[in-house]
Amino acid sequence: MDYRNKLVLAPMVRVGTLPFRLLAAQYGADITYGEEIIDHKMLKCERRINELIGSIDFVEKGTESVVFRTCDDEKDRVVFQIGTSDAVRALTAAQLVCNDVAAIDINMGCPKAFSVSGGMGAALLSKPELIHDILTTLRRNLNTPVTCKIRLLKSPHDTVELARRIEKTGVSALAVHGRKVTDRPKDPAKWNEIADVVSALSIPVIANGDVFEYDDFERIKSATSAPSVMVARGALWNASIFSPEGKVSHEDVKREYIRKCILWDNDIKSTKFTVREMIIHYSCLELAEGRAVIKSESTADLAELYGQKEYYQLVKQGSFYAS
């Protein structure tokens, strides 16, 4: 995996499932991160080949719950992100999936209570010895590239020092979100502090924060000297942000997303959550479209709502897969 000069889809919980990753790639994303999967959850899974739709599924044992779904089309660009606070668990989880993905990433930036309370995500930022243990354990035992994603610490000096320690573990790249744990999404990302990290490291740094238009990719690269850029909300609102030809209508993007959710049998809760987030940015859920999405109980309902009923029927009849 080459981490230089790449446009990267950020990991987003409940959003970064297979259909959305393929959507981002269709519009130009070079690397696509899956949503964070907690190591405990992954350890309950078994690998299955889903011959009906052509996917590789990691399914919770004793259930039909798909925890992670991927396919051969994305094998060279999908990054599996693990939420962990233990090196052995992280390695065991990574070993289950490493042959089906392009890289393994450790989440060290999530500020959400569920993550931090379990010693995962941003809680790791104050535990450099544990970070070292997790990353070196993965590096020594995997042939797959290993990376991690962090946030800014209290001071630029502290961030740079942590980044240097991370680099010494042998990771292939480091993603840096230009906000601190206490910052909110509305607070401006501190590109200058990402630049400090870039200048201190020799491995590629992936800059993340306040990328909402295609031109922002070059702006943040110019401001930080980072070779690659990661985008989250900008891609959620319109995945065609990755296209150098300019964004297409968010309505067209939404319909294409629904088609991919139909094709890859995406979980209805994930699909509804993602569509709701798309709607909220441009409109509100109280209008007709939003109310209809909320009321939808199945992918078939969403297919009808977005004019994809015929496509849905074609896929479910197996005609699409047969062709």
Image (tube, helix red, strand yellow):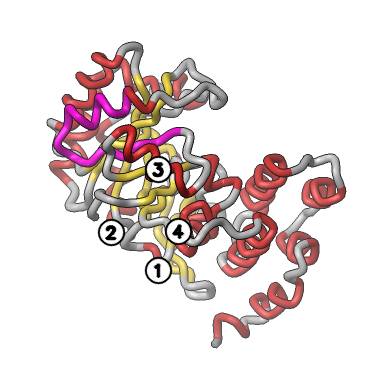
Q: Position of residue 25 (x, y in %)?
A: 45, 60
Q: Which residues are magenta?
A: 193-209
| 199 falls in the magenta region | yes
Label 4 sits on what residue type? Pro
Query: What is the crowding at mark 3: few (fewer than 14 residues within 10 Å), some, or many (at least 20)?
Result: many
Residue 61 visible in the shown view: no
Query: What is the crowding at mark 2: few (fewer than 14 residues within 10 Å), some, or many (at least 20)?
Result: few
- Of the numbered discs 4 and 1, the one sitting upstream in the chain is 1
Q: Circle 2 sits on which residue? A: 99
Q: Is residue 70 rendered to the left or right of residue 19?
A: left
Query: What is the crowding at mark 1: few (fewer than 14 residues within 10 Å), some, or many (at least 20)?
Result: few
Tell me the element at label 2: helix
- Of the numbered discs 2 and 4, the one sitting upstream in the chain is 2
At horizontal 49% and vertical 61% (from top left) the residue drawn is: 245
- Of the numbered discs 1 and 2, the one sitting upstream in the chain is 1
Query: What is the crowding at mark 4: few (fewer than 14 residues within 10 Å), some, or many (at least 20)?
Result: few
Of tags 1 and 2, the one toward the viewer is 1
Label 3 sits on what residue type? Met
Q: Is residue 89 above or below residue 197?
A: below
**Labels 3 and 1 touching (C-beta < 8 A):** no
Q: Circle 1 sits on which residue? A: 73
Q: Give the alpha-carbon distance from disc 2 to disc 3, as whole Å.
A: 24 Å
Q: Position of residue 63 (x, y in %)?
A: 55, 53
At horizontal 33% and vertical 40% (from top left) the residue drawn is: 221
Callout count:
4
Q: Give the alpha-carbon distance from disc 3 to disc 1, as whole Å.
A: 21 Å
- Of the numbered discs 3 and 4, the one sitting upstream in the chain is 3
Q: Position of residue 141 (x, y in %)?
A: 16, 45
Q: Residue furthest bottom?
A: 323
Q: Is residue 136 rendered to the left or right of residue 213?
A: left
Q: Circle 3 sits on which residue? A: 230
Of tags 2 and 4, the one toward the viewer is 4
